[in-house]
Amino acid sequence: MLAVIKTLKEARRREFQEIMDELQPYDMAQVYLALPAKHRRKFVHYLTVEEMTDIIEELDRETQLEILDTLGAQRSVKVLDLMENDELASFLSDLDQEKMKELLSAMEAEESTRVRQLMNYPEETAGRLMNDRFVWIRRHYTIGEAIEKLRHFAELAEYLNYLYVIDEDRKLVGVISYRDLLLADAKEQVEDVMYTRVVKVDVYTDQEEAAMLLNRYDFVSMPVVDEDNTLVGVLTVDDVLDVVIQEANEDIEKLSASGKSIDFHTKPLTAAWRRLPWLILLLFVGLISGGIISGFEDTLGTVVALAFFMPMIAGMTGNTGTQSLAVVVRGLVSDSLTTSRVIKLIFRELWVGIIIGVTCALLISVIAFVWQGSWILGFVVGSSLLITLIIGTLAGTVIPLILYKLNIDPAIASGPLITTINDILSLLIYFGIATAFLAQLT
């Protein structure tokens, strides 16, 4: 960092470029972010347009706009023209309409048209995510002709693992691996070597489903077609990795009931405002727990020792429910849901709840007996914990599955919500059993 600042201060452009040549785009972006504000303008102007195009895709929207303003109109347009169209479509989608139209109108007509076409596809679909710059070959090409075309257009291909084969109407008819291309005889025709069974996605396929397909087949790219099976783009593994991270972050936000995105840069007031709705709702739901305790006031007053175990009963039930919820949500991302699989999962979690419940119940029964000298109290606490742990585990399993079948994101069954519901059930069971054995406890 000090070396970069020194070259900027002393205007030693050649030495600056030598340092940049050793860095990856992500590293250059991190250097920019770490620079004092007074050196950022010179840093941007010392970089080539190609370098700026590489690093701008590594930055957040606010910083991207800051750099484009620094570059000026002419260089900014050059950067936009060189950006991958899928990245550019994502960038422009986050801007207001006026700014978006201004940037699109300033770009080259061809590039602007391609980006507009991508933006016509719904958000979070394969069409919006795909790269529309790719190399295709025709089925009647010889292997030699295909290799020659690949050499000529290699800069358009992010990955050279597969080439997609089309017919005269641009319909997708096959795929050939780069390895098979190199090993085949130069005079053979592509259609004699290609695979006709092609794993593909439609432009309207949900991005999460597309990511699962790439993961399932261990591909680094996958063709995207329209409703007529016309090849329109390629989905690559780096795009899918972004989707996986995005979807994981969304699920974490829902599981923690934080609602909208909160990161290290979110201001305190904004972060609090985004968390408050869920927490206020749960606050009122939690008042039910207080009502339950009030309803069993006589039981609690008669056997004060019952109060010692209340936090443990409620806490353990909520914990098991949250654990089951996490298992189900994670499993739904990687596995398809079938009736047999649902039944198997519910029974599996039932047995998990029983095993955990019996183990914890025996342990707490012994502790209660040794501590309070009452085997009846140990039985009440132990049996209550056994039942509530089983119910808590099943609640954390069944609730997200029901939401999934109703086409509602199962991550919405957030940890705090399930914990609160389980608190209410655990207190009802605990005090219900205690009241039934009240005569023996006194």
Image: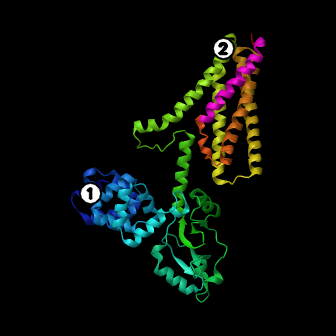
Which quadrant is home to the C terminus?
Answer: top right
The kind of secondary structure element at disc 1 is helix
Mark positioned earlier in the residue sequence (2 or 1):
1
- Image position, residue 182 (x, y; %): 57, 81
The kind of secondary structure element at disc 2 is helix
Residue 96 falls left or right of residue 131: left
Q: Please state which of the two labelled residues, at mark 2 or mark 1, is closer to the viewer.
A: 2
Instruction: Mark yes or no: residue 174 visible.
Output: no
- Image position, residue 60 (x, y; %): 40, 53
What residue would you read off at disc 1? 41
Q: Which mark, residue 297?
A: 2
Residue 350 falls left or right of residue 254: right
- At 59% from the left and 61% from the top, the residue drawn is 205
Q: Which amino acid is tagged 2?
A: Glu
Question: Toward the viewer: 10 or 358?
Answer: 358
Residue 336 falls left or right of residue 73: right
For the record, the magenta segment spans 417-440
- At 52% from the left and 65% from the top, the residue drawn is 130
Is 399 above or below relative to 43? above
Farthest bottom residue in view: 187
